Image: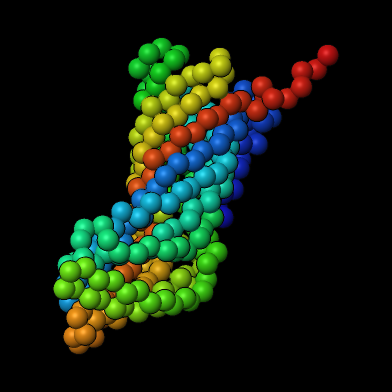
Amino acid sequence: MRKSIFITLSFFLTGILFSQKSIYLGFEGGPSFDKYSFFDNGDQILSLPLSSWSYGINFSYDLNNFFSVETGAIVKDYKRGNGFRGIGEGVGFNAGGINTVQIPLRLRTRIPLIKDRLFFSTVMGYHHSFNLFNTISSGSVGASGGNFILDSDEIFKGNLVKSFSLLETGAGLELRVLKTAYLRFSASYFTGFKKVSQSDIVYTVNDGPATRATIQSSGSYLSYTMSIRFPIASIRPKKK
């Protein structure tokens, strides 16, 4: 990890020394949809669309007209929750999950669609995520619908790891605006590789026997992002 950061910073320092026009400052943000794995002995728990937000700042360096490298800092807050079969699709609860700060190392490609105006962009990157939650919480949920009555208790473990890795793959469109700035719309999927949080749930249906379920996250999520970047040289005062 340290070696990768050193190599990336070397690119930026080289760019600053020889061509500040190749160094870009950017801002990004957009909705994300968190992914979980469900293990339910009673087959009553359903997944819900869990939306949250990510936003951050980035610095990119154009290696040439087709490739660039990028780093920065991204704030990503996760949601957690579930629905219950028998009450209705999409009916359940959601709450806050872990909160993270990600340090990305990205390689982007740009393929011109309309010369010097519109580009097709792809990205592959490694994200090192720092877990800021690092605690355990608990809660109870009661729900009913028709002849269906459910009670559940949850223990959420957000302290399983202090940091974790994500692999980003994505694509989008980039539009040149204001002569030197670029506006990008993209979609990326972030793949996690180890368990980073877990909810242990015990629930009863119609006062029946207690049933256990587990909901786990590896940090994976789908993200839709809008970003803008512009050369750092354009915001420096011109020498007289």
Q: Is residue 23 visible?
A: yes
Q: Position of residue 224 (x, y in %)?
A: 39, 40
Picture layout, residue 36 above or below residue 222: below
Residue 48 versus residue 187: which sits nearer the camera?
48
Which quadrant of the view contains residue 95? Answer: bottom left
- Determine the residue located farthest toward the bottom in the rendered image: 209
Give the left or right position of residue 213, taking residue 114 as reference.
Answer: left
Residue under the image location 16 percent in, 73 percent down: 147
- Which quadrant, please, contains the C terminus? top right
Q: Is residue 109 visible?
A: no
Residue 60 versus residue 152: which sits nearer the camera?
152
Q: How many marks?
A: 0
Q: Position of residue 239 (x, y in %)?
A: 80, 17
Picture layout, residue 46 above or below residue 238: below
Give the left or right position of residue 63, taking residue 220 as reference.
Answer: right
Picture layout, residue 193 above or below residue 168: below
Residue under the image location 38 percent in, 77 percent down: 140
Q: How is the image coloured?
A: rainbow
Residue under the image location 17 percent in, 77 percent down: 42
Q: Position of residue 197 (x, y in %)?
A: 40, 69
Residue under the image location 21 percent in, 68 percent down: 145
Give the left or right position of residue 120, taking residue 75 as reference.
Answer: left
Q: Position of residue 100 (x, y in %)?
A: 51, 58
Residue 158 versus residue 1: which sits nearer the camera?
158
- Determine the residue located farthest toward the right in the rendered image: 240
